[in-house]
Image (cartoon, helix red, strand yellow):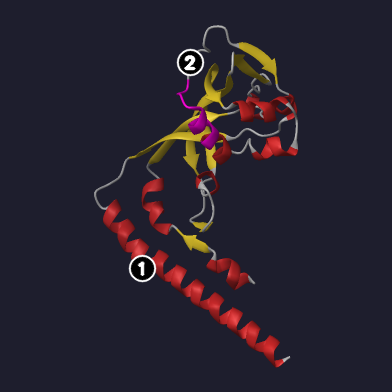
Amino acid sequence: MAACLLSGCYSNVNREWFEARTQYSGHELAYGLEGKDGVRSLPPVLYSRGTEWYIAAYRCQLKDKSVPLHYAWDKYHERHQFLVQQRDVQRPRYHRITPELAAWLLHADEQSKRRFLPDALAEDFRRAGGEWLDTLPPGARAQSAAFLKFCKLSPVVVDTRHVASRWYDYPAAGLTFLCVDVPFSIVSSIAAGLLVSSGEAIDDDE
């Protein structure tokens, strides 16, 4: 079983050549921060204007603390463990969301939690369109959101990534990919195949 799980993983050690000098910026939907680091959570509301809906977040600087081993099916924010280094709590910003997401957040539900995860939010922002705004559009009104009121999550959505690489980082990363990452994937796949074959052989004997 362990080998089968391992075959569904891959290593990304080559990325470590860049991560120490990589800076990320994004937005933190800080609705579950009350008392943490002295930061107040955002008001548990959405903002509406006609058929348009908006949600607030704090702009922030991030550091990636993820380990270089992932499941093959992991999404972007699952492959990274972003830690907030700095956040601008004085000036919240606002992004448009889809009416579907707004409906889930206005009412507390288990499905609402699934839609309030980083990758799901990033996809919803893409579908809704637009950019982060420093101020709400004229006429936008606050609407109490039940899910945000009791939410214990503060997901972070990454906007940009800046890499200050050295001249030898790319060659070193390529060599690491060939000498470490590729052999790891091959060996784990072979090991899993042998284990499965052995298990089937035992079942046939029985």
Q: Position of residue 125 (x, y in %)?
A: 52, 30
How many marks are shown on the rendered structure? 2
List the single residue furthest toward the bottom.
205
**Depth check: 170 or 136 in front?**
136
Q: Earlier in the sequence, mark 2 or mark 1?
A: 2
**Left or right of 12, for residue 38:** right
Quarter of the picture containing the C terminus is bottom right
Left or right: 45 in relation to 178: right
Is residue 39 on the magenta stretch? no
Q: Which residue is mark 1?
A: 179
Q: x and y percent of residue 113 in the render? A: 69, 37
Q: Amino acid at mark 1?
A: Cys
Say whether residue 34 is visible: no
Q: Which mark is residue 134?
A: 2
Residue 197 coordinates in the image, percent (x, y): 59, 83
Residue nearer the viewer, 65 or 139: 139
Query: For the magenta stretch, what is the residue range?
Result: 123-132
Check disc 1 and report its element: helix, strand or loop.
Answer: helix
Residue found at the very far left of the displayed protein: 167
Q: Which mark is residue 199?
A: none
Give the amino acid at mark 2. Answer: Asp
Q: Position of residue 10 (x, y in %)?
A: 48, 62
